[in-house]
Amino acid sequence: MKKDFSEALGRHEQRFGQAGLAFAAPARVNLIGEHTDYTGGLVMPMAIGFHTVATIGPREDGRAVFHSENFDEEASYEIASLDSKPEGRWSDYPAGVVWSLRQEGVRIDGFNMTLSGDVPVGAGLSSSASVEVATAMAVLGRAHFALDLKAVASLCRRAENEYVGAKSGIMDQFVVAGGVAQRAMLLDCRSLEFELLPLPAGVRVVIANSMVRHDHATGGYGDRRDEVETGQAVLQRERGIELLRDATLADLEACREKMPAVSYARCRHIITENGRVLEAREALLQGDVKRFGELMVAAHASMRDDFEASCSEVDMIVEIALRQPGCFGARITGGGFGGCTVNLVDVTKTGEFVAAVRSEYRAATGIEADCFVCEASDGALALAKDGTA
Ligand code: GLA
């Protein structure tokens, strides 16, 4: 990562009159494997070069004081009495991490923290996991307390599930904490074992933001999860299958009449998606970009039709992308109901691709889409005193 974060350190110093320790956590994009993580399934995300920087310094009164540069707001909590009481604002995420770290037995003294960053919010690129992991790294760094990747990802997920109240899986926190530059991460969300896979030379990952906002805590994500869990419970009862991860399409078919039609469709998406992730792994190992692209297209159709987590604007931007020369695959990425698409594009065609997608999407919807040509970057890390990574 060659990014200069010195400004973030400088702003912490200006605000709190103290030098700070700084940690940066990236955003992520999921290449394939959507809505599979919370049923123990397979995902293939990569970390990308947008970051949250958490800069931390001491204070004497036992309080955790957060200042968000992006919101230009402060939030203050007494650490010893921090309870799971979300307020529905940005500070729930860092406060939730402090709460979760305390549950983990980490002793936390008072601190000031400045949070800043360039992760697009509400776009499906994991701005929340980025804030969580940056906060956890900073608090742990100051407390001289080391936790491994699984523990950091799990405690950040707990903050989001139990404090913020968003029922997300582990994918985002895991890859934000542990991603590796130039590699996609195939994560088994049951065992938390992972494999780092080479990304093919000659293509770039391009993200296109439909600019349709979604909100995990209140949006359709929770509904989908409930529908999936209803189906999973039927599979448990009827077939003794604990996690949807272990179900086949034949198992699902055998239970079809015993579950609501929507649960059947949601589970079918997840079962077929786990299969696509394994095929995508093979495609990457063989450098077969064409096959990988086809799997992305099939994954989008499944998210749209079986999971019903796309929307007309996102379907439109996928269709536009697939018409462009040099585009191997395009699909919705993240929780859904808006947000971003991920596209695999010939490296020599990215400029034309971005220009064409933006202008055709503007003509069709009147919306200006942000597009980013990305590389897989490293997960969270401590910054040097001068703010370099
Ligand atoms: C969100 C959640 C993840 C995952 C994806 C869908 O990003 O935070 O845990 O469920 O949606 O794949």
Image (cartoon, helix red, strand yellow):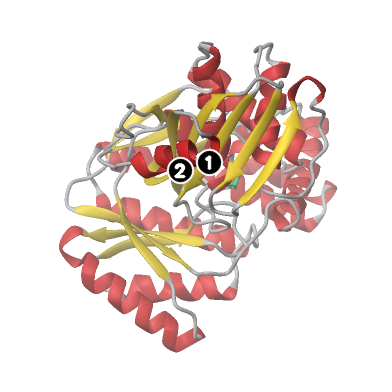
Quarter location, residue 169: top right
Pick the front one: 344 or 271: 344
Residue 324 placed where, x, y %? Answer: 29, 74
Q: Considering only vertical position in the picture, is 109 above or below 309?
A: above
Give the labeled residue for mark 1.
15
- The C terminus lies in which quarter of the figure? top left
Left or right of 354? Residue 185 is: right
Q: Nearer the viewer, residue 31 or 152?
A: 152
**Residue 53 shows up from this direction:** no
Indicate if the residue with disc 2 has its beta carbon within 8 Å of ligand 1.
no
Q: Are marks 2 and 1 in contact (CB under 8 Å)?
A: yes
| Neighbours of disc 1 within 10 Å: few (<14), some (14-19), many (20+) | few
Q: Is residue 150 left or right of residue 77?
A: left
* Residue 372 place in picture, x, y as percent: 35, 60
Q: Which three-letter amino acid code belongs to the residue tagged 1?
A: Arg
Q: Is mark 1 within 8 Å of ligand 1?
A: no
Image quadrant where one finds the N terminus: top left
> Which residue: 78% across, 19% down?
80
**Where 70 sits versus 59, above or below?**
below
**How far across and how far down the image is residue 247, in percent?**
64, 35
Residue at position x 72%, y 58% from top?
Answer: 220
Where, by quadrant of the figure, is residue 279 drawn? Answer: top left
**Amino acid bearing label 2:** Arg
Relative to 140, residue 96 above or below:
below
Marks 2 and 1, how far apart in space? 6 Å
Q: Secondary structure at mark 1?
A: helix
Q: Give the number of the disc on residue 11.
A: 2
The secondary element bearing badge 2 is classed as helix
Report the image quarter containing ligand 1: top right
Q: Position of residue 109 (x, y in %)?
A: 65, 17
In the rendered structure, the answer to whether residue 268 lies left or right of residue 364 reads right
